Image (cartoon, grey):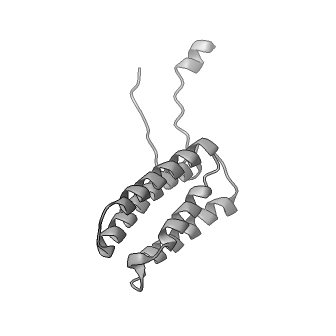
Amino acid sequence: MADDQENMIELDRPTRGAKDGYLQLFFISRQQLGRIISDPDGAVTDQRIITYTKFLISSITDDDIRDQVKEMYAEKIQAIKAEKLDNETRHEKMVDATMDVLGDVTAFYDEFLGITHRLKVGIA
């Protein structure tokens, strides 16, 4: 029986479960961040991008993952602030850093949603 368990490959997704309200918060928050980023009025110096990204990071329920993503984002923002850039270039880099972090947050939620599937076949 132990040999059968070792040869088993789990193809099921999602690997985690969550209440619908928790997942809905992610989608609503992501949509709101999109509005903030795409707002043409004052977007170049809009500090809500940083604040809202931190808000999304705080929704990660795994302490270790949340801390890693929070630290990575802080490092990216510090590096951008340390550079001597015009406002438009700074904003563009902030959006890029935000998109990187949003990808990490989305990857965390993907364990609940099962959007990404990796199926292996023909394994001996």
Residue 29 located left or right of residue 34: right
Q: Residue drawn 52% across and 37% down? A: 11
Visible residue check, residue 47: yes
Residue 97 located left or right of residue 32: left
User: Foreground: 43 or 5?
Assistant: 43
User: Foreground: 30 or 72?
Assistant: 72
* Residue closest to the far bottom: 41
The quarter of the picture where residue 13 lies is top right
Q: Residue drawn 69% across and 63% down? A: 21
User: Foreground: 81 or 48?
Assistant: 81
The quarter of the picture where residue 84 lies is bottom left
Q: How many marks?
A: 0
Q: Position of residue 51 (x, y in %)?
A: 54, 67
Viewport quadrant of the C terminus: top left
Visible residue check, residue 115: no
Q: Position of residue 77 (x, y in %)?
A: 43, 59
Q: Position of residue 60 (x, y in %)?
A: 60, 52
Viewport quadrant of the N terminus: top right
Q: Position of residue 87 (x, y in %)?
A: 33, 74
Q: Taking 94 as reference, is 45 above or below it?
A: below
Q: Taking 3 as reference, is 39 above or below it?
A: below
Q: Residue drawn 62% across and 60% down? A: 23
Q: Taking 89 as reference, is 40 above or below it?
A: below
